[in-house]
Amino acid sequence: MTPFFIALQFLTIFPVQLKEMPSKQQNGQSLLFYPLIGLMIGAILFAIATLLHALPVILLSSLILVVWIWLTGGLHLDGLADTADAWVGGFGDKERTLKIMKDPSCGPIGVLSLIILCLIKWSALYVLLEKQLYSALFLFPILGRLAPLFLFLTTPYVREKGLGSSIAECIPKTGSVTLSALCLVAAAYFAWVGVLTVMIFIGTLIYLRHKFIQRIGGITGDTVGASIEICEAVSLMSFVMSLFYLNFS
């Protein structure tokens, strides 16, 4: 169970203490548990929505968003802010972009990216909860955590040291592909809305991968974190928009 605990420790705030330093193979295998962590996060959000459904929707959507962020410790949002700052401040230069990503301070572009993303998530959550589609809350954290599987499978990791390099070196390719396919197929539970959401999710991932390779030649931990947040937000927004269009077209 060490790979599972590695994933739980890395992706959430749950207090997990590993008894010994994990091996490269265990770090690589932990990637297979990322969608399971997403499922756990979704289950918590679903439970909150179900138990507190009597609250005003505007309050419930705010509460769920805060818990969503709190469960991850803001780790992926930090990656998004760093990536946004680096993309604008890097002026198209690879080394400058990577250097800015290492800077712990958050610039105005990073702050703006956080505001925009949280606003998109909150407004889409509001519509989703208004329609009482609580079960959909399982989907978006899972899709977000499929992003690292896709990126580590298909994209070089540009930093030589760190957790990401060992994950990229030892990721179980067959298991990752199979798991990703199963998760994507499961979205068909939501009929055409789920299928369309998955198609947009895949398109978003391909676009992000293209931009990462174009700018820095691959991925870093920050770009992976940014991808999780962007994919969650885009999937959530796509689901709500598709639902509205298919219902009222």
Image: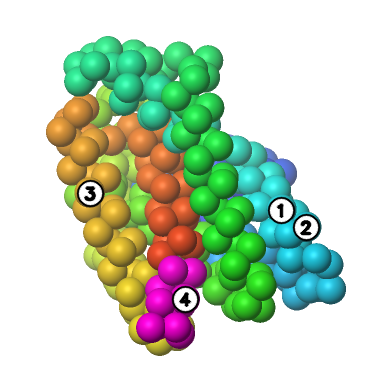
**Crowd around label 2: few <14 · some 14–19 · many ≥20 (10 Å):** few
On the image, the x and y values in percent for residue 105 come to 53, 15
Q: Nearer the viewer, mark 1 or mark 4?
A: 4
Mark sitting earlier along the chain (3/4):
3
100 up-or-down from 225: above or below: above
Mark sitting earlier along the chain (1/3):
1
| Residue ID at (23%, 36%) | 212
Residue 63 left/right relative to 234: right
Name the amino acid, label 1: Ser
Q: Check disc 1 and report its element: helix, strand or loop.
A: helix
Task: Tell me the residue that label 4 is attached to.
Answer: 244
Quote the CA–CA distance across marks 3 and 2: 34 Å
On the image, the x and y values in percent for residue 86 come to 35, 21
* Labels 1 & 4 near each other (Cβ < 8 A): no
Q: Check disc 4 and report its element: helix, strand or loop.
A: helix
Task: Tell me the residue that label 1 is attached to.
Answer: 62
On the image, the x and y values in percent for residue 88 come to 32, 22
Mark sitting earlier along the chain (1/4):
1
Quote the CA–CA distance across marks 2 and 1: 5 Å
Q: Nearer the viewer, mark 3 or mark 4?
A: 4
Q: In the rendered image, which quarter is residue 241 located in?
A: bottom left
Task: Tell me the residue that label 2 is attached to.
Answer: 59
Task: Tell me the residue that label 3 is attached to.
Answer: 207
The answer to whether any part of residue 117 appears in the image is yes
Q: In the rendered image, which quarter is residue 92 located in?
A: top left
